[in-house]
Image (cartoon, helix red, strand yellow):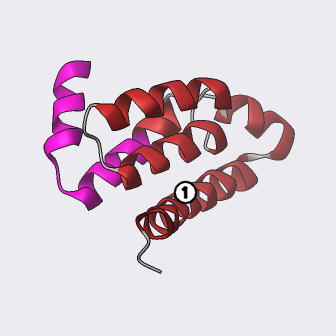
Amino acid sequence: MAAGLFNFIINASSWLSTIISAMAGSMLSGNPLNSYILAAYLYEEGVSLVAVTAFMITWVTVGIAQAPVEKEYFGWKFTIFRNILFFLMAIIASILVTIIYKGII
């Protein structure tokens, strides 16, 4: 299944692969060091820079797996708001990083 999703991300449009990568990063959260290793592998295999960046940012900042624990301390309202906000910010940041890196601005 992972190979099929991986191939889909590579072959999908830039916007679709970005959303899917951000969703994957949200569900597979981890520490920042591991995100660099995964990002390097994904980028070398042909995943777009914007999708890789969205994956890296959501991997660290959005935590679907940690939501039940976060809810205990901060409540559902804050937990959902924070995760949605960081998900959207990750998409925006990945677009900005790609624009700056590619030298468009």
Magenta stretch: residue 30 in it? no
Magenta stretch: residue 6 in it? yes
Q: Quadrant of residue 59?
A: top right
As displayed, is residue 62 above or below residue 5? below
Q: Residue furthest right?
A: 73
Magenta portion: prevailing SS class: helix
From the image, which quarter does the N terminus lie in?
Answer: top left
The three-letter code of the residue at mark 1 reads Ala
Q: Is residue 31 visible?
A: no
Residue drawn at 38 percent across, 51 percent down: 49
Q: Nearer the viewer, residue 46 or 10?
A: 46
As displayed, is residue 34 above or below residue 61? above
Q: Nearer the viewer, residue 90 or 82?
A: 90
Q: Quadrant of residue 8?
A: top left
Q: Position of residue 69 (x, y in %)?
A: 74, 29
Q: Residue furthest bottom?
A: 105
Residue drawn at 22 percent across, 30 percent down: 5
Residue drawn at 75 percent across, 39 percent down: 71
Q: Quadrant of residue 102?
A: bottom left
Q: Position of residue 94 (x, y in %)?
A: 49, 59
Q: Position of residue 95 (x, y in %)?
A: 45, 65
Q: Nearer the viewer, residue 6 or 40?
A: 40
As displayed, is residue 85 above or below residue 51? below
Q: Determine which residue is flagged by label 1.
A: 90
Q: Residue furthest front?
A: 103
Q: Nearer the viewer, residue 49 or 65?
A: 49
50 on left or right of 27: left
Segment colored magenta: 1-23
As displayed, is residue 98 above or below residue 48? below
